[in-house]
Image (cartoon, rainbow, N blue to C red):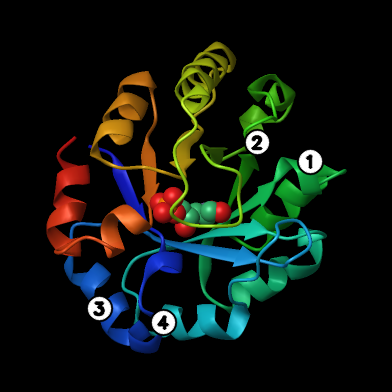
Amino acid sequence: MAIISPSVLACDFANLQSEVELINASNADWFHIDIMDGVFVPNISFGFPVMKAIAKHATKPLDVHLMIVNPDNYIKACKDAGAEWVTVHYETCPHLHRTIQAIKAEGMKAGVALNPHTPVSLLEDVINDLDLVLIMSVNPGFGGQSFIENAIEKVAKLKRLINDKGASTLIEVDGGVNNLTGKKLLLAGADALVAGSYVFKSEDPTATIDVLKAL
Ligand code: DX5
Ligand code: ZN
């Protein structure tokens, strides 16, 4: 069964506590937390004080997606704000191996996200160090964008790389995930699905989470 990580970016920020409680009570597995800096991506979401507020009420792991330059400077802040999984972007990390080790040294699980144009093959030499790879199926920065189909082929390639290297890395996909794209991604080998608007803009987010869980 897939891991479902609803993206808090699409929730009602004025009712954050009740949105967190909705996820707590649902069959979702993680909270996907999108941190944006207005530099790496052309948007700003929220920062560590908000993440801390979410962590205070969340009963499930925080899956943090850092869309920021110089993520090394904020690894400790992630730990202090309650992160369990920290994913940095390949495109922001000139010393990726060091960044991965720094995340693990804080006792957190380490992930790397790939933009739509960044090939899976670039992870060949670090795959065995990674707990998770996040395939972006939209250009990061905004919720509600349409799914880039090439992500399906990337998931299949990544699955082959993980198997070839004997790694135990999880494959997560983020952007434009719904019941249709989610199904294709799972067939290609994805383990975890992030969903923002599909969950929170639906009539019944709890039932929508169940739809994703049942794929
Ligand atoms: C986009 C974020 C996503 C976003 C997904 O940059 O990383 O996590 O919230 O939103 P949807 O599911 O609406 O595409
Ligand atoms: Zn995300």
Per the image, the residue denoted by label 2 is: 129
Q: Earlier in the sequence, mark 4 or mark 3?
A: 4
Question: At 51% from the left edge and 33% from the top edge, which residue is drawn?
Answer: 169
Question: At 36% from the left edge and 78% from the top edge, which residue is drawn?
Answer: 12
The three-letter code of the residue at mark 4 reads Phe
Mark 2 closeness class: few <14, some 14–19, many ≥20 residues within 10 Å: some
Question: At 64% from the left edge and 24% from the top edge, which residue is drawn?
Answer: 120
- Dot 3: what SS? helix
In the rendered image, the vertical position of residue 9 relative to residue 69, given as above or below:
below
The three-letter code of the residue at mark 2 reads Asp
| Mark 2: C-beta under 8 Å from nearest atom of ligand 2 | no
Residues tagged 2 and 1 counted as in contact (Cβ below 8 A): yes
Disc 4 from disc 1: Cα separation? 35 Å
* Residue sitting nearer the eye, 18 or 150: 150
Disc on res. 97 = 1
Disc 4 from disc 3: Cα separation? 13 Å
The three-letter code of the residue at mark 1 reads His
Q: At which x and y percent is residue 74?
A: 74, 69
Mark 4 closeness class: few <14, some 14–19, many ≥20 residues within 10 Å: few
* Residue sitting nearer the eye, 12 or 92: 12
- Dot 4: what SS? helix
Q: Earlier in the sequence, mark 2 or mark 1?
A: 1
Per the image, the residue denoted by label 4 is: 13
Disc 2 from disc 3: Cα separation? 33 Å
Residues tagged 4 and 1 counted as in contact (Cβ below 8 A): no
The three-letter code of the residue at mark 3 reads Glu
Q: Which of marks 1 and 3 is nearer the N terminus?
A: 3
Per the image, the residue denoted by label 3 is: 21
- Dot 1: what SS? helix
